[in-house]
Image: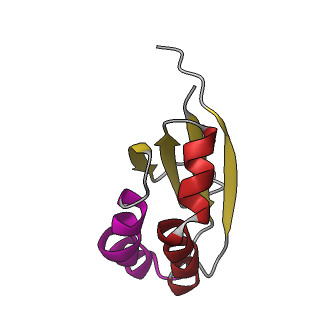
Amino acid sequence: MTASLLACYHHPEDTEAFDRHYADVHAPLGLALPGLVSFTGTHPGPGPDGARPAYYFVAHLTFTDAEAMGAALSGPEGAAAVADLANFAGAGVDLLTGPTTRFA
């Protein structure tokens, strides 16, 4: 069973700087993680009532299994990605991990 990491980023003060750093620096660090199966990102839209979404950006990384995810995150590539958070995620990020259930 695959395992996922969801990185839920709070709203930054400078969205253009966040997006630029994420695309140019952080995403390549994520793509270097061993055992990575897929890596997607979403800028959530407003809720049905037009309310601002809870997060500015959500990244979804899927790994071959929980062991591969653990090894990737604890290895040098994971350390580099975690260290980079201080360079662009000053508003905060919530990290969620767990097994992935595929419904379709």
Magenta stretch: residue 8 in it? Answer: no
Q: Is residue 50 visible?
A: no
Q: How is the image coloured?
A: secondary structure
Residue projecting furthest to the left: 24
Q: Which image quadrant for residue 82?
A: bottom right
Q: Main secondary structure of the magenta part?
A: helix
Where is residue 83 shown, x and y percent of the image?
56, 80
Residue located 50% across and 41% down the image:
63
- Magenta residue check for 16: yes
Q: Give residue 27's quadrant in the image.
A: bottom left
Residue furthest to the bottom in view is: 87
Viewer-nearest residue: 87 or 71: 71
Q: In the rendered image, is residue 32 in sight?
A: yes
Q: Which residues are magenta?
A: 13-31
Question: Which quadrant: the N terminus?
Answer: top right
Q: Position of residue 12 (x, y in %)?
A: 56, 76
